[in-house]
């Protein structure tokens, strides 16, 4: 049977296909305060007639707050990379507005087991965060927020009064303003007066990278946990300031679908999420069903999507005492599109989103006490469960990489996890933790479940299909030494002071008078060492790197320096010693580095500073292939790493530009996962032969090997079933899906003497794999600096067939091609920008790829 709303569309074609006035969307029999501006008064078009742009959206939200201050308060959470405000409307009754801060303080005490028992839930409003369109090209949500804002500010009568008395609504009109602006510009500029519904039309086919992502081409709906991006950081601050009971996450799905609301697939709920969460999700679902039934919209539940990865907007709340709700509306992806279900108009998609915002509010109002009770119980049970946990605390820290250590502390604090200093030096799990620079997270605290999800490894799963990654063990991602502490280890005296802010770390020149007339040294271990190196090179400083270890006299004793140590000889510079001193001092401070000022180049052991074992490091001139066919997420991770974290510029070249540009000015070229059919292969090959460093990750490795650039041999996974087996038709998705590598963590064994491993100290480096690129180890015994042993899985789910193929395979292979090098990295060293443990490998390829011995990469 056809969706009734679609049928109505055909009956009243003019009404459905052209602009809709507010009557199309709003519930009938409600009167509205005429003093409140309607969307059209401010945005100049009807809702759904065009896609509202972000600036007009903000103007409307401001107008609403100005016209209805007794109900609506507007806050600016922060600004995006492109400097768009992230606004939040706080909507509640006039009486509640007057005591808003009091309500907030009382509310967040429900999450504090020490205080929550004192509160009478019967008198407390429920807090609901209505969030829209984190994927910028799924705009029905954001456009529905215009209607929600109008309705909540302007509706009159008993029903709205009752709602506002019992709720505090945090209306977040756009989770991703930059992506929204990109997409709205695209669809509006292609809109015809006579709407063209042909899916082939340019309106429905965005150019790369599309509006889904934020400025750096990241999926913000994977960033709630790592919180790498400013949008997530600002939002999380407000999330924890209010600790909502419900958070809705309005998305769009494929155009031929209908409407989805959670619960999702029951077998794929994260086991750390208590069962009551899904029970409440289902109870709320009854309201969505009833409201959608009323307007004749088709929908489905439980068959798709899941609540497994806590980095998604509809799942993060589940591990924070709240209920996250995912909504997925079939996308018109423009203004009117032909679909399997008939013509799908943009206004119709907006109507469904608005309707489910209303059903959420109605459900929240009626189930208010149950949700508040759940929030309180979630945290009290976290304390009772953690009290009996055999693991009492986690300790972590890397004294050689203080910046990376504190950036992990920053992530923990952002999620309101209590972190303490380490009071005494301890050893655990084969690691030594020094009191200076190590930190302790005791598990007996309200965020117990979230701590487990961030620190634990996973090997057992109820299902073998995943909507997203299967594991995200954070200390492995950050590449930090860490250990569990049991009751005997976690005794009094271990725990130091509680942290209230991210610890400050300092850099500077140490030794003697600080100024050297001979040479300066700094080690490569610190996270920002590459940024420091580039800063120096940009200032014209000549630098070398140690390809051997050495030991110098220091402070009456001796000090060892590792592979990759950066050496700056004073007399070899074109700038005077005084100026060099100033530049190095600033660089050390900017990048939290200890720089050693030396007065002699004579070492106690290893190579003297004048040895040819110190290799000149050329300043990188980087290009990356981007554009259609290239995986925007992977490319965005590189852009973000270089630009945001390392202050290193890179030129983004479309394949057509690569084909005609003079490539002589680049010495490093990056190609991430993607399809490069448009690229001039001969030109690429000759650029490498002439001395370029080509850095390939994931599927670019496959592409290059298939196109005769570099010489690696790919390994294939054995088929899980042979052709004699007969299986059920409906079982196919499960069998095929299980062969995907959705994302798991593998430990690669590293040759710590190889330039690509400079800066690493742990022999096993955790890398993240979410692809099916498997390489045989090179025949040249020196050309596989990172490889997998016969038991490489550190955490996550992978099929037996894929586990078999990754065993004893190569992680990284270097090929010598003429005077150049091809560096094949099978995995993604920059995964979602929180895989800081892989950053050094990637940056080593950029800085030191050229220095790798030709003989160590030859296979001919
Ligand atoms: Zn989405």
Image (cartoon, helix red, strand yellow):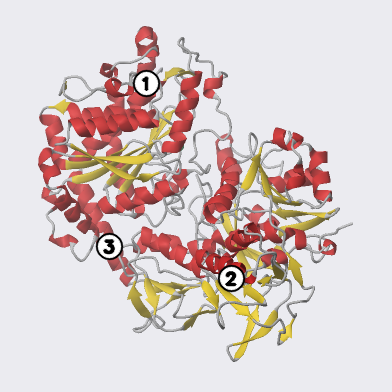
User: Residue, x 48% and y 23% (percent of image)?
Assistant: 187
User: Residue, x 35% and y 65% (percent of image)?
Assistant: 501
Residue 806 visible, this orientation: yes
Spatial separation of the CA atoms under disc 1 and disc 2 = 61 Å
**Considering the numbered disc 1 on the image, is that residue within a helix, a strand or a loop?**
loop
Spatial separation of the CA atoms under disc 1 and disc 3 = 45 Å
State the mark number for residue 668: none
User: Residue, x 28% and y 35% (percent of image)?
Assistant: 286
Local packing at callout 2 (Cα closer than 10 Å; few below 14, some 14-19, many 20+) is: many
Mark 3 or 2, nearer chain start: 3
Local packing at callout 1 (Cα closer than 10 Å; few below 14, some 14-19, many 20+) is: many
Residue 108 image offset from top left, x and y in percent: 22, 55
**Considering the numbered disc 2 on the image, is that residue within a helix, a strand or a loop?**
helix
Displayed-image quarter of ligand 1: top left
Q: Quadrant of residue 839?
A: bottom right
User: Relative to 56, is 163 on the left or the right?
Assistant: left
According to the picture, the residue beneath numbered tag 1 turns out to be: 48
**Total tally of numbered discs in the picture:** 3
Q: Quadrant of the N terminus?
A: top left
Spatial separation of the CA atoms under disc 3 and disc 2 = 57 Å
Name of the residue lying farthest toward the right: 860
According to the picture, the residue beneath numbered tag 2 turns out to be: 581
According to the picture, the residue beneath numbered tag 3 turns out to be: 381
Q: Is residue 31 above or below residue 249?
A: above
Name of the residue lying farthest toward the bottom: 556
> Under 8 Å from ligand 1: the CB of mark 2?
no
């Amino acid at each position: 049977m056809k969706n009734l709303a679609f049928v109505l569309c055909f009956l009243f074609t003019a009404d459905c296909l052209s602009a809709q006035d507010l009557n199309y969307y709003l519930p009938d029999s409600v009167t509205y305060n005429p003093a409140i501006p309607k969307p059209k008064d401010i945005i100049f078009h009807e809702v759904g007639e065009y896609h509202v742009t972000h600036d007009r959206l903000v103007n409307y939200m401001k107008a609403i707050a100005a016209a209805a201050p007794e109900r609506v308060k507007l806050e600016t959470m922060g600004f995006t990379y492109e400097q768009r405000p992230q606004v939040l409307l706080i909507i509640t009754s006039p009486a509640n507005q007057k005591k808003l801060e009091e309500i907030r303080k009382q509310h967040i005490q429900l999450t504090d087991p020490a205080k929550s028992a004192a509160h009478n839930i019967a008198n407390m409003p429920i807090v609901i965060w209505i969030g829209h369109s984190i994927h910028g090209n799924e705009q029905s949500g954001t456009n529905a927020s215009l209607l929600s804002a109008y309705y909540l500010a302007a509706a009159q009568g008993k029903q709205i009064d009752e709602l506002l008395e019992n709720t505090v609504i945090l209306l977040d009109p756009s989770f991703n303003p930059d992506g929204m602006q990109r997409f709205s510009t695209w669809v509006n500029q292609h809109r015809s007066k006579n709407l063209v519904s042909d899916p082939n039309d340019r309106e429905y086919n965005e150019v790369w990278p599309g509006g889904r992502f934020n400025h750096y081409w990241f999926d913000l709906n994977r960033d709630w946990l790592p919180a790498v991006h400013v949008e997530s950081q600002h939002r999380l601050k407000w999330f924890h300031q209010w600790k909502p009971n419900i958070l809705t996450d309005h998305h769009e799905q494929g155009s031929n679908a209908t409407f989805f609301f959670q619960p999702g697939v029951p077998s794929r709920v994260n086991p750390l999420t208590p069962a009551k969460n899904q029970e409440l999700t289902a109870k709320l679902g009854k309201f969505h069903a009833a409201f959608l039934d009323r307007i004749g919209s088709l929908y489905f539940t439980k068959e798709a999507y899941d609540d497994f990865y806590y980095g998604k907007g509809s799942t993060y709340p589940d591990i924070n005492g709240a209920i996250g709700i995912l909504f997925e509306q079939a996308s018109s992806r423009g203004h009117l599109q032909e679909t399997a279900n008939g013509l799908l108009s943009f206004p119709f998609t907006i109507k469904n989103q608005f309707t489910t915002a209303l059903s959420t509010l109605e459900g929240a109002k009626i189930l208010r006490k149950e949700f508040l009770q759940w929030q309180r119980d979630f945290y009290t049970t976290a304390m009772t469960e953690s009290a009996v946990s055999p693991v009492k605390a986690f300790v972590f820290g890397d004294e050689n990489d203080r910046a990376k250590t504190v950036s992990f502390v920053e992530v923990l604090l952002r999620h309101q996890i209590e972190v303490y200093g380490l009071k005494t030096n301890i050893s655990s799990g084969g690691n030594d933790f020094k009191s200076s620079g190590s930190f302790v997270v005791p598990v007996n605290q309200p965020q117990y479940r979230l701590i487990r999800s961030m620190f634990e490894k996973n090997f057992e799963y109820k299902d073998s299909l995943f909507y997203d990654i299967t594991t995200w063990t954070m200390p492995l991602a950050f590449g930090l030494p860490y250990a569990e502490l049991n009751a005997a280890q976690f005794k009094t005296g271990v725990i130091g002071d509680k942290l209230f802010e991210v610890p400050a770390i300092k850099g500077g020149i140490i030794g003697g008078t600080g100024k050297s007339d001979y040479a300066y040294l700094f080690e490569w271990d610190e996270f920002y060492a590459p940024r420091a190196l580039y800063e120096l090179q940009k200032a014209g400083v000549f630098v070398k790197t140690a390809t051997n270890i050495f030991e110098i006299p220091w402070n009456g004793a001796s000090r060892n320096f590792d592979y990759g140590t950066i050496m700056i000889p004073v007399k070899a510079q074109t700038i005077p010693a005084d100026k060099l001193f100033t530049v190095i001092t600033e660089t050390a401070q900017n990048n939290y580095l200890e720089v050693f000022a030396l007065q002699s180049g004579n070492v106690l052991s290893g190579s003297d500073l004048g040895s040819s074992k110190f290799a000149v490091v050329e300043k990188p001139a980087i290009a990356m292939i981007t554009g259609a066919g290239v995986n925007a997420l992977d490319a965005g991770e590189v852009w973000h790493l270089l630009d945001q974290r390392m202050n290193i510029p890179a030129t983004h070249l479309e394949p057509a530009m690569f084909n005609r540009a003079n490539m002589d000015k680049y010495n490093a070229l990056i190609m991430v996962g993607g399809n490069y059919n448009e690229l001039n292969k001969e030109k690429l090959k000759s650029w490498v032969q002439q001395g370029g460093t080509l850095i390939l990750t994931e599927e670019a490795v496959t592409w290059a090997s298939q196109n005769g650039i570099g010489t690696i041999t790919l390994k294939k996974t054995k088929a899980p079933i042979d052709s004699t087996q007969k299986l059920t038709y409906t079982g196919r998705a499960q069998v095929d899906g299980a062969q995907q590598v959705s994302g798991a963590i593998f430990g690669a064994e590293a040759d710590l003497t190889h330039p690509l491993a400079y800066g690493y100290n742990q022999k096993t480096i955790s890398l993240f794999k979410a692809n099916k690129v498997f390489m045989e180890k090179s025949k040249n015994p020196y050309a596989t600096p990172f490889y997998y042993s016969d038991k490489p899985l550190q955490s996550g789910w992978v099929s037996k067939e894929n586990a078999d193929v990754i065993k004893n395979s190569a992680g990284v292979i270097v090929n010598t091609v003429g005077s150049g090098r091809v560096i094949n990295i099978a995995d993604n060293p920059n995964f979602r920008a929180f895989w800081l443990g892989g950053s050094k490998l990637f940056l080593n390829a950029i800085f030191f790829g050229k220095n790798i011995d030709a003989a160590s990469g030859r296979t001919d």
